[in-house]
Image (cartoon, rainbow, N blue to C red):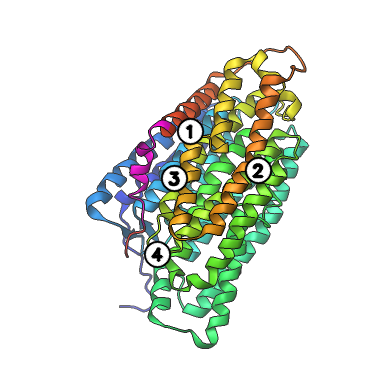
């Protein structure tokens, strides 16, 4: 064979239907939007939701096939298809549907229908799905950049507000630093092991008890990877970007960043550290241990002193990242169910954060500006049903029994106790108590204080669908947790 001949990998197109559907939807959205002069107002969200639904059906079909086929790799072993990646993909697609509904009411008369925002939503989903499925560190990095660049633009997409443009710029600058750390970490790990394959790195490290002079190089690479992922998951002390970006970005975009963005980052972190660096767990587990405790306390304590609800939820998101890190730490021990509890937490948190920001978007108004705690005073007298829905979601985030949030927090704490990580488990419980004050503070403001004005709160029907769905899912999972836990127990990395 001619040595200069390009050898391309065999592509199993049938296993790429999810990604192909999202790519086709993106192209159709841009093409039809540019060719049709008077594009219907709901044309973009309807097409986006239809695309996500098609992708979800394809992913669900793949989930069923994996019960007999097991995990496998495609596209030259660059992409992994297993129960872990498919479960994370379904969470991301649910986020796309809910975010599309919220974006559909965020149209302004100056800029018209923000068609490009829906296209970016689909491209970000492509990046997120490739991230959770990547079996190559280079592919993972490219997917991360697709996701990040889309989120940068979405954060700055509200041209009416300076805060939105500022949020996009801050996210871009700090995100660039984080990506650099991650890329340097990949380079160091490659220099130490001679491969960028996630499963290949695990095989190399498992086959050698020590790496000699390359050991220091590997440790530096692991440290840089932790910094890069720490930024993406909003772990303290790398969380400084989160409050400003969450507050400045359009609320519908913030909800998507807090859900799909976190799912993709955590899923990638879990795969990289539990598959490729499993034999070096003693080197990175103590760092995750510290990050989990610090993140829970920083998020919980900083949230209670905020006066802006979006910033409160931003710090709450940091606290939730700490709880998920508790599950990650538990997953690093053999025999624990930390992996399953972490993915369960991500699924539950996605629905809760979408419902939370849907209500915030309703109160914030068309200018997306009324997000202070004062705007929520007396909401029970202005719109009792909305106050009741928000109360249910806030109680769930606090971990009140018979809500999905209790199932999530109990799961990660239980997984930590089972592997005898008692300090982390106690820290998580104390952090939950501190964080409960935040949710109680908002609830008291809605029910016991007088409203600042008597304006009627109008809930657009797409936002109402998101809120109703979030509340129903919260209560159903709270009363019947096995509906989600049975599926989560099947989540695992396939042996490759």
- As for residue 488 lying within the magenta part, the answer is yes
- Mark 2, Cα crowd under 10 Å, few <14 / some 14-19 / many 20+, is some
Q: CA distance from mark 4 to mark 3?
A: 19 Å
Residue 482 x/y as whole percent: 35, 38
Mark before the other along the chain sequence, 1 or 3: 3
The local secondary structure at tag 1 comes to loop
Residue 365 lies in quadrant:
top right
Residue nearer the viewer, 166 or 480: 480
- Which region is colored magenta? 479-492
- Binning the other alpha carbons within 10 Å of mark 4 as few (below 14), some (14 to 19) or many (20 upward) gives few
Query: In this picture, is 296 found above or below 399?
Result: below
Query: CA separation, marks 4 and 1?
Result: 29 Å
- In the rendering, which numbered label is found on residue 342? none
Kindly report the distance in space between the C-alpha atoms of the residues bearing marks 1 and 2: 18 Å
**4 or 2: tag closer to the N-terminus:** 4
Q: Is residue 254 above or below residue 343?
A: above
- Disc 1 marks which residue? 403
Horizontal side, residue 219 vs residue 12: left or right: right
Task: Name the spot of residue 186 as percent of width and height, x first.
Answer: 54, 69
Rendered image: mark on residue 344:
3
Q: State if disc 2 and disc 1 touch (CB < 8 Å).
A: no
Query: Cβ–Cβ below 8 Å for labels 1 and 3?
Result: no
Residue 157 at x, y percent in the picture: 66, 38
Could you say which quadrant of the image residue 218 lies in? bottom right
* Measured Cα–Cα span from mark 1 to mark 3: 13 Å
Label 4, secondary structure: give it.
loop
For the residues labelled 3 and 2, say whether their Cβ atoms are less than 8 Å apart. Answer: no
Which numbered disc, 1 or 3, marks the residue closer to the eye? 1
* Residue of label 4: 334
Assess disc 1: are there few (<14), some (14-19) or many (≥20) residues with their C-alpha within 10 Å of its C-alpha. many
């Amino acid at each position: 064979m001619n040595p200069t001949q390009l050898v391309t990998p065999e592509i199993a197109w049938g296993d790429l239907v999810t990604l192909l559907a999202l790519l086709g939807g993106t192209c159709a959205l841009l093409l039809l939007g540019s060719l049709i002069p008077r594009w219907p107002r709901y044309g973009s969200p309807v097409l986006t939701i239809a695309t996500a639904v098609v992708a979800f059906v394809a992913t669900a079909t793949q989930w069923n096939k994996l019960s007999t086929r097991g995990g496998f790799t495609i596209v030259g072993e660059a992409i992994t298809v297993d129960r872990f990646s498919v479960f994370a993909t379904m969470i991301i697609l649910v986020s796309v549907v809910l975010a599309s509904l919220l974006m559909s009411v965020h149209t302004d008369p100056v800029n018209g229908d923000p068609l490009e925002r829906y296209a970016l939503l689909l491209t970000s989903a492509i990046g997120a799905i490739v991230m959770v499925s990547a079996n190559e560190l280079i592919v993972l990095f490219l997917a991360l950049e697709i996701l990040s660049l889309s989120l940068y633009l979405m954060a700055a997409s509200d041209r009416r507000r300076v805060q939105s443009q500022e949020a996009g710029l801050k996210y871009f600058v700090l995100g660039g630093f984080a990506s650099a750390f991650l890329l340097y970490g990949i380079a160091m790990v490659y220099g130490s092991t001679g491969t960028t394959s996630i499963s290949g790195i695990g095989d190399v490290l498992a086959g050698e008890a020590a790496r000699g002079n390359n050991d220091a190089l590997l440790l530096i690479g692991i440290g840089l990877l932790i910094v890069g992922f720490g930024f993406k998951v909003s772990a303290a002390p790398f969380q400084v970007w989160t409050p400003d970006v969450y507050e400045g970005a359009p609320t519908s975009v913030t909800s998507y960043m807090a859900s799909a963005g976190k799912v993709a980052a955590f899923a990638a972190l879990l795969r990289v550290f539990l598959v490729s660096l499993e034999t070096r767990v003693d080197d990175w587990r103590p760092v995750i241990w510290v990050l989990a405790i610090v993140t829970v306390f920083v998020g919980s304590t900083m949230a209670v002193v905020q006066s802006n609800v979006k910033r409160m939820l931003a710090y709450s998101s940091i606290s939730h990242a700490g709880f998920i890190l508790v599950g990650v730490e538990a997953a690093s021990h053999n025999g624990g169910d930390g992996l399953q509890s972490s993915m369960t937490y991500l699924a539950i948190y996605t629905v809760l954060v979408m419902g939370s920001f849907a209500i915030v978007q309703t109160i914030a108004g068309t200018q997306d500006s009324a997000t202070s705690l004062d705007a929520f005073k007396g909401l029970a007298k202005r719109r009792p049903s909305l106050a009741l829905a928000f109360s249910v979601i806030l109680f769930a985030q606090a971990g009140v029994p018979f809500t999905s949030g209790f199932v999530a927090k109990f799961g990660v704490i239980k997984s930590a106790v089972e592997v005898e990580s008692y300090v982390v488990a106690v820290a998580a419980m104390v952090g939950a108590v501190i964080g409960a004050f935040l949710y109680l503070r908002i609830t008291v403001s809605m029910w016991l204080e007088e409203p600042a004005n008597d304006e009627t709160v109008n809930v657009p029907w797409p936002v109402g669908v998101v809120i109703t769905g979030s509340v129903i899912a919260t209560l159903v999972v709270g009363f019947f947790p096995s509906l989600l836990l049975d599926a989560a127990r099947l989540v695992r990395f396939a042996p490759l």
